[in-house]
Amino acid sequence: MDKRQETKFAGNPVTLVGKKISVGDKAPDFKALKNDLSEFNLKEVEGKVVLISVVPSIDTGVCELQTKRFNEEATKLGDVAVLTISCDLPFAQARFGGAEGIDSAILISDHKDLDFGTKYGFLMEEFRLLNRGIVVIDKDGTVKYVQYVEENTEHPDYDKAIEEVKALL
């Protein structure tokens, strides 16, 4: 498995595990868990523009704001699948989503198999959490935008991601 150390968590270097994806790659299918413990895979949103918001944990301030922001954007974007993925347990995601009114974005958990984290290169080996970032996939399943945040305590470039999504509609 590929390993690279190129990101930080609270100022400390961490190792990302998996294959880093790039613009132009075919988006790998992956399996994760929905909040009801049923399986999610990327094929469920096939044919749509997909924005994947990747967060270390919804129970932190930046992750909470990122999740809320993309949920709000999802209501404005129309036929776009907005996914928020983390390694939080599905039960925690369901609690958070209910308490915060997350109703337009789909919360999914990579905690069981780390399939997304390793296939997309977002897994932080030291913490078994996902590195913060964004992936935008077009209707044909091609990656059109990727951001791996260099410091996990910082926000991603929301505006750039939304701009990329709008260009695909």
Image (spheres, rainbow, N blue to C red):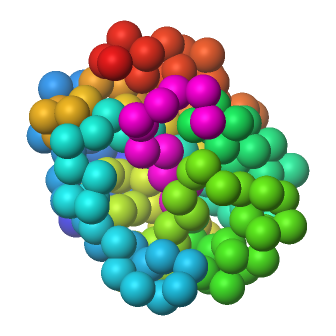
The percent coordinates of residue 159 (x first, y second) are: 61, 16
Q: Write the residue at 45% across / 61% down.
A: 123
Left or right: where 4 falls relative to 109? left
Q: Write the residue at 79% across / 51% down.
A: 64
Q: Please determine whether, in this image, residue 162 is positioned above or below residue 64.
A: above
**Quarter holding residue 76:** top right
* Residue 120 shows up from this direction: yes
The percent coordinates of residue 131 (x first, y second) are: 55, 51
Give the camera-side residue of 46 and 7.
Answer: 46
Left or right: where 34 falls relative to 146? right
Q: Write the residue at 57% across / 63% down.
A: 107
The percent coordinates of residue 50 (x first, y second) are: 36, 40
Q: Tell me which segment is drawn in magenta.
A: 75-85
Is the C terminus in the top left, top right, bottom left or bottom right quadrant?
top left
Is the N terminus in the top left, top right, bottom left or bottom right quadrant?
bottom left
Left or right: where 19 falls relative to 128? left
Please give the count of numbered marks on the rendered protein. Answer: 0
